[in-house]
Image (cartoon, rainbow, N blue to C red):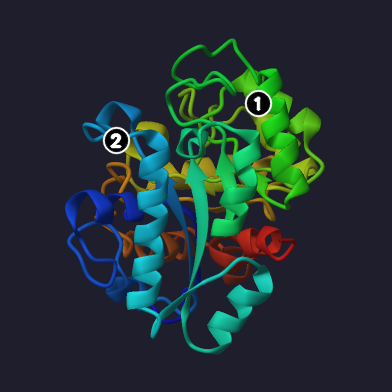
Amino acid sequence: MEHIPYFDAHCDTIYRCLRTGAQLRENDGHLDLHRASSFGRFAQVFALYQDPEELPRGSTMVREGRLLHRRFLQEMEQNRDVIVPCRTGAEVDRAAADGKMAAILSIEGAELIGCDPGQVETAAEWGVRFLNPVWNWPNVLSGTNCQERSRGLSGQGRAFVREMERLGMLVDVSHLFDPGFWDVLEMARRPVIASHSNARAVCPHTRNLTDEQFTAIIKNQGVVGLNLCREFVGGREDVDALAAHLEHFLALGGEHTVALGGDLDGCEPVKGVPDIAGWAVFYERLLQLNYKESLLEHLFYHNFMRVVSQL
C-alpha cells in the first residue's frame, strides 16, 4: 500500500473514540493510525459529529461539540509523533514532507455550535475547515435529505453560510437535500464540497447527488467524495458497484472533482471493504479495470488537495 496516496474527506472516528473509549492510534473500528500508516501519503478529514437522538442524558449538543473537539486535540497530542492537525494545504504538504500524517477538522451538523452564526468564529478558532449545516435531522438552518426536504436555507441559515465564507471555511452539502443544496450553490463564493455523497442516477437515494448537482459542483470548482456506505452505493453493494458511481461522475466530466469520502466509522461499508484498507482494495480493482495511475492519483489525493490548498 506504500504506493497508494490517501486523502479522505470524511470519517466519524473521533465520535467513536469519544463514545467507546477507543484510541486513535490502534483500535478495532474502521480507521486507526496503525493501519493508516500503510499508505504512501495520508490525510484525513475528521468530523465532529453527534446524533441528537443518542445525546447522553443531561448533556447538550453544544457541550458534546466541545467534548468532541477536546478529544480530537487529545488524540493529536498523544500521537504527535505520527500525525499533525492541519488547517491549510501548505501544512498538509509540510506534514507529508516530515513523514507524518495530516488531520483536518470538520463539523457534521451545526447543532454542535448551536446553529449560531455568531459561533462560526469559535469553530474557525478550533481549526474547523469544513462544516455541514445539517446532519439527518432538520434544524433552524435548513431541512435535510431525511426530513423537511422541501425546506432550504432559512434566513439564519444564509447568515450562517455567509459567516462561514467570510472566515474562509467551506460549506459541506452532504446531508442537505435539493432546496438547501441549491441555496448554498447560489450563495457560494468559495468551492463547495459534498464530502461523502454518491451519484443519484446510479443509486436513487436522497443522500446522493443528481447529475445537475454534480455538474454545478464542477463549475464551482468544488469536490465530491465517494461514500463507501452500502445504502448509498446500491447494486451489488461491492467495490464494482462503487466503481459504477465513479464511472458515472467521470462521464459527467468529473476527473478533477471526484475524491474519497468513505464515511468510515459512520457506516456499514461495501462488501470487501472491512476497514480503511479497503481503499487499497478499491485502488487495485480500478487498476484491473484499466484506470490509469495518473487518474487514481487525482481521485485518491490531488482532487481534494486542490480544494484544501485554497484554504
- Neighbours of disc 2 within 10 Å: few (<14), some (14-19), many (20+): few
Q: Is residue 18 left or right of residue 11?
A: left
What is the three-letter code of the residue carrying label 1? Gly
Q: From the viewer's perspective, is the residue at label 1 or at label 2 nearer?
A: 2
Q: Quadrant of residue 188?
A: top right
Residue 37 sits above or below residue 104 on the image: below
Give the image location of residue 155, x and y in percent. 71, 19
- Neighbours of disc 1 within 10 Å: few (<14), some (14-19), many (20+): many
Q: Quadrant of residue 227?
A: top left
Does the image show residue 200?
yes
What residue is drawn where x is 30% and y is 61%? 31
Residue 148 sits above or below residue 133 on the image: above
What residue is drawn where x is 45% and y is 24%? 205
Looking at the rendered structure, the secondary structure element under dot 2 is loop
Q: Quadrant of residue 201?
A: top right
Q: Which mark is residue 157?
A: 1
| Viewer-closest of 68 and 36 | 68
Give the image location of residue 114, x and y in percent. 51, 33
Q: Residue furthest bottom?
A: 98
Give the image location of residue 197, x and y in percent. 51, 39
Q: CA distance from mark 1 to mark 2?
A: 24 Å
Residue 255 sits above or below residue 52 on the image: below
Q: Is residue 196 left or right of residue 20?
A: right
Looking at the rendered structure, the secondary structure element under dot 1 is helix
What residue is drawn where x is 46% and y is 74%? 4
- Which residue is identified by label 2? 59
Q: Quadrant of the C terminus?
A: bottom right
What residue is drawn where x is 65% and y is 35%? 117
What is the three-letter code of the residue carrying label 2? Ser
